[in-house]
Amino acid sequence: MKQSKLLMPTLRDIPAEAEVKSHQLLLKAGYIRPIAAGMFSYLPLAKRVLNKIEAIIREEMSKIDANEMLVPEVLPAELWQRSGRYETYGPALYKLKNRQERDFILGPTHEETFTQLIADEIKSYKKLPLTVYQIQAKFRDENRPRFGLLRTREFIMKDAYSFSADQEGLDEAFHNMEEAYINIFNRLGLQYRAIVGDAGAMGGSDSKEFSAPAAAGEDTIAYSDATDYAANLEMAKDFYERQPSKAAQLDLKKIATPNEKTIDDVAVFLDKPRNQLVKTIMFLADEELVAVITTGDFEINEVKVQNYLHVDSLVMADEDAVRKVVGAGFGSLGPVGLPENIKLLVDERAADLANFAAGANEDGQHYVNINWNRDVKLPAENINDFRVVHEGDLAVDGKGKLQFTSGIEIGHIFKLGTRYSKTLGAQVLDNNGRQTDVIMGSYGIGVSRLLSAIAEQRADEDGLVWPASVAPFDVHIVPINMKDEDQARVAEQLETLLVAQGMEVLVDDRKERAGVKFADADLLGLPIRITVGKKANEDVVEVKVRASNTNIEMRVSEVVDSVSVLLNASEK
Ligand code: 9G3
């Protein structure tokens, strides 16, 4: 293709709102343009990359016999009202009315759509297991879209759904999809970790998240420096074995702490280490008041609390509501003297304490030397891990210490079970002739997000650096001066030879200075650049491998073979 015909509007200055490298470069190199907050146009170069990413996904999906489909993006609200999600997803769910005033949504994901289709079309276990997928725009009215394609209000997702008659079928579909994801991300040249993800709202049992390490990543990943244990921070676990303290019980004492508001103030005032204090936070769990207690040296992990309680919503209770029920404000809450009807969840480290301190449920008062079962009943049935791990903690398997890194969630796979088939009536006759709920899995890849993830991991200060597997073109031919007939001839010759080898070639035929051409070539980021300059009259050109910034002079006759080798070297 001639670059004079390519729509590639480069920018001299980077807009201020672009805070991360991938966003800056995709704007500067003319790959994307915003049309509204969190909504982008994919210009020709980005569309070419998307096409290659999608082609790799399709190849790996067909290897596991997944059927590609496409369902509507505008969905009748009634489908989501039956699954119960129409109300629970709040402001992020785009809602609209049609000309007859009927309610619709813009699909953020499609568990309901595909479950309903299977409910209507599949009646016997003999037709299962079955996996379907699509590559399609999703809509989520994010509160704070940012970082270019990393967090948008419209994005392209590959979403797949598996349906089987038994658990083994789901386990197999989940395993096959996990393998396919490993192949896809390897072929895209991405660094990534498969980590323990939060299956939370999806109501399933377990889930696996694929996280690409990157400074711009919004997720914090905790991984062990000694094993391959890794988890989203919300799920990460440290090593802890229960051992209730055997210390002699001291007398309970109430102490005035008039100006101590934070756990640190109280620790200093009472001259106690933070792990001898407990913090008490009150939550509304599906409208029910719940008190959660951890030792003062850990934060309370709301995802662990929400998953433990299996509630749709968990929000911190507001202070007035708490004061009305408990009679004290946030800085003076504790387990002693809480109204009986408030459920108490106790983190295992707090459950093992003796003679600990906590708010007295009276403003400006704290108790010291609290002991479980003497001063307050220890709720044995609600002791669990409700804490957020710290960097440096022992990992849950006791091997290695937890390190933190930021990651971009590029994929997430879930074992859903019958959460949707039960509510939407997707059943089949099993091999005993009994109706049984279909067992499901759902599997996502953030396709448009992958553009940014690859750019984040591979770009350098001169611009984007695409692996050959997804580059918009394979080879960039840059003649310094198109008016020079040797250079024009050699450029033409090389383009013909390379295209004949099935390569996609971009020729910079623009009437620009060499400096502009080189800077744009580095910005654009094609894997191989062939500069046709003064030595064209000796049939000698210079080949540059973008990823390693190495330059090799060679004869035109050698170019085709060496370019094929170089392309395969850079992750075809
Ligand atoms: C919504 C809105 C946002 C959402 C969801 C629903 C995330 C929602 C989770 C998933 C789970 C899987 C199939 C492919 C793999 C991921 N954000 N999720 O369900 F209404 Cl507004 O999307 N879906």
Image: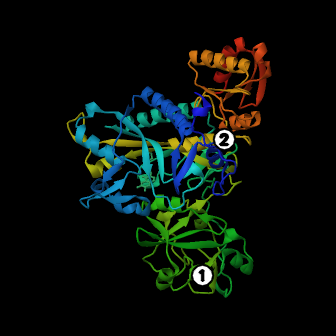
**Seen from this angle, which residue lies furthest left?**
433
Q: Amino acid at mark 1?
A: Ser
Structural crowding at the residue carrying mark 1, measured as other residues with C-alpha within 10 Å and reported as few (<14), some (14–19) or many (≥20) = many
Image spot of residue 389 (x, y percent): 63, 57
Image spot of residue 311 (x, y percent): 42, 62
**Among numbered discs 2 and 1, the one appearing first in the sequence:** 1
Checking the image for residue 89, the label placed there is none
Image spot of residue 261 (x, y percent): 65, 80
Q: Is residue 372 visible?
A: no
The residue at 67%/88% (across/down) is 258
Disc nearest the viewer among 2 and 1:
2
Tell me if residue 318 comes above or below residue 407 in the rendering.
Answer: below
The residue at 56%/78% (across/down) is 375
Q: State the residue position of label 2.
A: 457
**66 with respect to 241 (left or right):** left
Dot 1: what SS?
Answer: helix
Q: Is mark 1 within 8 Å of ligand 1?
A: no
Quadrant containing the C terminus is top right
Q: Quadrant of residue 78?
A: bottom left
Q: State the residue position of label 1.
A: 332
